[in-house]
Amino acid sequence: MDNVKLIDNYYKSLDEADILEIMEHISTEELMYMFGRDLDSVAMLRMLGAPEIENPDEVRQGRVVFFDMPSTIMDFMAYFIEVFGLHVSDHILLAAVLIKNKKINTAQKEELLADTVARVHFLDQFIHRFYIMVTLIRSNVNYFELTEAEASLLQLLGLFMRTVLNVMKTLDDSMPQWWSVGMTRLDITPAIDNFEFLVLRTLALDIFTVDKDNGVEDDPYIIKYEEYTEEEMLKMGASIKQVIHAHDALTRIALPPVLIDAVKGMEKMAARLPAATSKKVNRELLERFKAMNNNMKFYWLIHHYNELDN
């Protein structure tokens, strides 16, 4: 069976819970061990539970490579990983703003706070693993001569990332109206079409082969966007800025130092108020918020991916 179809069938055999379980059991230590060594795409495919592909070391033939593209699919993936990390971390920043504004003032709201922090940490671990895997691929492969294993790995990573986008959207959609500040409400939806177009559609155009039975004309993301007008494309490209603008709006809200110090790396995002403002923060709620984040790291906060600046 053609490897593109093999990976596609494998992905379709999984549901969301399967994919999250696979991602949860990937060892970050094992991934980190791969740095400084030749990329083992077959091993990474196994981590993702993929079936054995055919001729993994052969260069994929029949690709339509766009040599004049300023960015590769790996660059697009790296960009969206940072958008994912920024967005989920914004829920923690928003939580700190709500604590400062004394909006978390009932047991029910505090319970939602604890549940949200746990869900964000759960998502963040996947974002970190995506980051490591894409970094390994970017630094080790010749994009213009991808092997079957490398192309299959990129295909599966793109599909897994799309599933995590769904989980992020579920988190956003589940938040009550009061989980907002002013006109700023967190919503990853604008990133979905952008991700499908720039990552999954580009995968179909640039990595899939055109001389197989499952040519790109059958790809759902080619079909979805083939009728888009130039105006719709421009509108879609601009929409992802809504996610960045929400982040920027939150970072302009200065916080008492004790709230910034409650989360490792929060100083990367939050402006700091004078020390005296810390006295106005509910001490019991602050300690509980710190405990929710105890011994946990948000990888977007403590790493500087810098993709959004490129």
Image (cartoon, grey):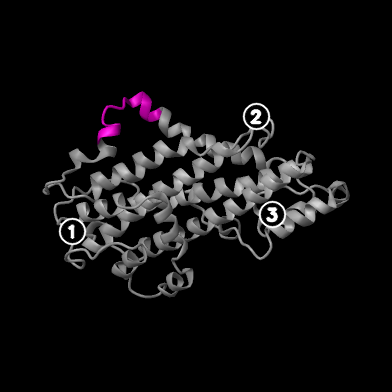
| Residue receiving disc 1 | 60
Residue type (three-letter) at the residue carrying disc 1? Arg
Q: Earlier in the sequence, mark 1 or mark 3?
A: 1
State whether residue 200 is above or below residue 146.
above
Marks 3 and 2: which is nearer the front?
A: 2
Report x, y in % for residue 69: 30, 46
Q: How many marks?
A: 3
Magenta-drawn segment: 223-234
Q: Return the residue at label 3.
A: 267
Q: Write down the residue under mark 2.
A: 183
Check disc 2: other Cα within 10 Å, few if <14, some if 14-19, many if 20+.
few
Residue 168 numbered tag: none
Judged by its main secondary structure, the magenta piece is helix
Place of residue 129 in the rendered image (x, y in percent of width and height, measured from the top left): 46, 61
Marks 2 and 1, Cα distance to the nearest angstrom? Answer: 48 Å
> Which residue lies at the image location 33% right of the left edge and 63% below the top edge?
49
Specify few, some or many for label 3: CA neighbours under 10 Å numbering under 14, 14-19, or 20 or more.
Answer: some
Q: Name the residue: 44% across, 73% down.
A: 30
Residue 149's x, y, as percent? 25, 63
Q: Nearer the viewer, residue 111 or 157?
A: 111
Amino acid type at circle 3 is Glu
Q: Would you call the spot at circle 1 few (<14 residues within 10 Å), some (14-19), or many (20 or more)?
A: many
Q: Amino acid at mark 2?
A: Met
In space, the residues marked 3 and 2 are separated at their CA atoms by 23 Å
Q: Is residue 306 magenta?
A: no
Under circle 1, the secondary element is: loop
